[in-house]
Structures are given as C-alpha cells and as structure tokens.
Image (tube, rainbow, N blue to C red):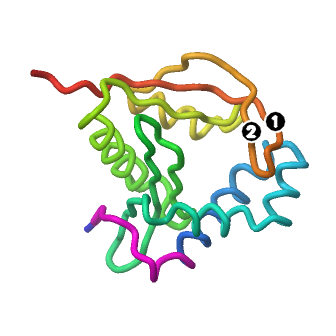
C-alpha cells in the first residue's frame, strides 16, 4: 500500500539519500561536469533537502519513504523516486498528487526537465505533459544546462 503525505523531519536523511541516488543514477551522465562537481563538493542534496523538506510530500511504501515531490505554486520543482522503487507506479502517484495540489489554485502546471533525461521526459509525456520550449536553465552549482519547459492543463471541470 502506498501512502502520500507530508514529509517529516525524522525523514531528512532518507530524503537526502533519495536525492543523491536519483541524481547520481540518472543525472550524472547528462549534466555538465561542473554541475556534477558542484553536486558532490557542495552537498547539493543535503542543502536542498534541509532547506525545503517542509514543503515535500512523500510516497511511503509499507514503512519506507520511496520518493518525494516538491511543488511550489504551479510548478513541480522536484520529483524523485529511489531506484529500488522505480517503475512501480510511485512516481505516477506522486505526480498525480502534485497535479491535484496545483489544480486547487492554478489552471496549468509547469515543470523543467533536463535535456537528455529521456526517461523522465518520456514519463511526463506519458502522463499528459507536453513540451513548451527549450531554454538554458541552471543545474547544481548554478551551472548552465539545457532544459525543456513542460506543461499540463490541470484545470478542474466545473
């Protein structure tokens, strides 16, 4: 059974572990080398999680946190699933939860995906998201990296 709920302070270490595992497992091969160096040297996962965990929602499988979601205003800022739980529907559940949160106050949702992150891009397309434009974004350490802005209508039917 999967429970989606707000993150708890005693889960910070697990959230950092998930962020590191997903970044190193997926992003390490596609981000600029400077961003990867900044991720390691600057403890980007720890900094990010400690600063934002109170705004995270988590997917809990049995008693273990399998992944987390960070939504800010109308944007999915981060969605991470631990590799042990990948491709089992937990990412889709968190994404749907984020879309629902956004729909309560915005008609559309946005997110950025790093160019070259083909699995994430395909995942979002499969869930009804579409490309809006390509742009130069920032990765770990404020390193420029090519991104794709994606969008989805989440307006509720009246």
Q: Position of residue 114 (x, y in %)?
A: 68, 36
Label number found at residue 138: 2
Q: Which mark is residue 81?
A: none
Q: Can residue 90 be found in the magenta stretch?
A: no
Residue 121, image x and y in percent? 57, 33
Q: SS at mark 1? A: strand
**Front position in the image: 8 or 61:** 8
Q: Residue at x 47, y 52 (%)?
A: 70
Relative to the observer, which residue lies in front, 129 or 16? 16
Considering the image in quadrants, where does the N terminus appear?
Answer: bottom left
Considering only vertical position in the picture, is 20 above or below 118? below
- For label 2, the SS is strand
Which callout, 2 or 1, points at the residue further toward the start of the chain?
A: 2
Tell me the quarter of the image containing the C terminus: top left
Q: Residue furthest left?
A: 158
Residue at 50% of width from left, 57% of height from top?
86
Q: Which residues are magenta?
A: 2-13
The picture quadrant where one finds residue 15 is bottom right
Q: Are marks 2 and 1 in contact (CB under 8 Å)?
A: yes
Q: Is residue 156 left or right of residue 115?
A: left
Outermost residue toward the bottom? 10
For the residues labelled 2 and 1, the Cα–Cα distance comes to 5 Å
**Identity of the residue drawn at 45% across and 54% down:** 69
Classify residue 99 as left or right of residue 132. Answer: left
Residue 50 to residue 124: above or below: below
Residue on which the image places disc 1: 144
Q: Is residue 4 found inside the magenta-colored segment of the image?
A: yes
Residue sitting at x 48%, y 34%: 124
Q: Position of residue 79 (x, y in %)?
A: 50, 50
Where 16 sits versus 10, above or below? above
């Amino acid at each position: 059974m999967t429970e989606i709920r707000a993150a708890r302070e005693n889960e910070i270490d697990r959230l950092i572990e998930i962020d590191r595992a997903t970044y190193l497992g997926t992003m390490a091969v596609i981000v600029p080398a400077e961003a990867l160096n900044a991720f390691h040297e600057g403890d980007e996962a720890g900094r990010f999680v400690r600063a934002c965990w109170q705004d995270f929602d988590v997917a809990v499988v049995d008693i273990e946190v399998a992944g987390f979601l960070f939504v800010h205003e109308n944007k999915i800022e981060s969605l991470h699933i631990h590799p042990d739980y990948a491709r089992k529907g937990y990412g889709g559940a968190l994404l749907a939860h984020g879309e629902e949160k956004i729909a309560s106050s915005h008609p559309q949702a946005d997110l950025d995906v790093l160019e070259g992150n083909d699995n994430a891009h395909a995942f979002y397309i499969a869930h009804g998201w579409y490309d809006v434009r390509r742009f130069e974004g920032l990765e770990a350490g404020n390193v420029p990296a090519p991104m794709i802005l994606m969008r989805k209508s989440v307006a509720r039917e009246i």
